[in-house]
Amino acid sequence: ERFVTVRRPSADGADADEESKRNNDNLDDETSSQYEGEGETEHLMQKLFDSYATGNWRGNRIFLRFPDLKEFAEDVKDIAPRLHRVFNKYSCVLESTFDDTLQLQIDFGTRTNRGLTLHWFQVFLQKSLKKLGLE
């Protein structure tokens, strides 16, 4: 991500530079702590995707609807039985969310209907959790 810094000119110049530096230091502290959690989430999503994505499209791994989604739901049963019950109960919701996300992926330029890329897998998980009330 990019950040733009804008400074207001002052009459004496030096005070504005020092104040700007203090403000930027505070901003850096706030933004770094804000984005630390996002980096961990992205790493976790990457590991999750790598564990379950068995498809291949143009040399890139993709998450397939039937085999990968089913295996993912089965493994969730062992890790979190409550989530597995929700997955089984709402499997049609997950499948429709998968299909919606796949269509979004196609609409945004990734022309495959075989499975989801990493980016769209993340979108699928977020949409699924939100629809199931687990976010």
Image (cartoon, helix red, strand yellow):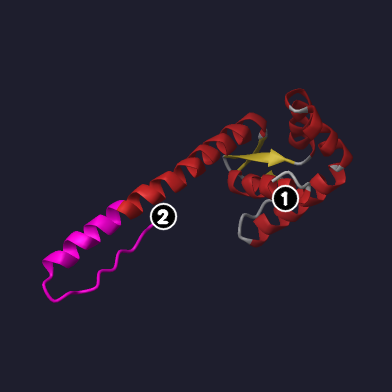
Residue 104 drawn at (x, y percent): 68, 58
Residue 125 drawn at (x, y percent): 68, 44
- Estimate how packed mark 2 is, as few (under 14), some (14 to 19) or many (20 or more) residues with alpha carbons within 10 Å: few
Q: Name the side, left or right, on which 5 lies relative to 45.
A: left
Secondary-structure class at tag 1: helix
Q: Name the side, left or right, on which 21 lies relative to 83.
A: left
Checking the image for residue 1, the label placed there is: 2
Residue 7 drawn at (x, y percent): 25, 69
Real-space CA distance between mark 1 and mark 2, rounded to the nearest whole angstrom: 25 Å
In the image, what residue occupies the spot 71% across and 52% down?
102
Checking the image for residue 130, the label placed there is: 1
In the image, what residue occupies the spot 82% across and 38% down?
87
Asked if residue 105 is positioned above or below residue 77 in the image, the reply reads below
In the image, what residue occupies the spot 69% across and 46% down?
135
State the extent of the magenta-drawn residues as a range.
Answer: 1-25
In the image, what residue occupies the spot 11% across and 72% down?
12
22 in magenta: yes
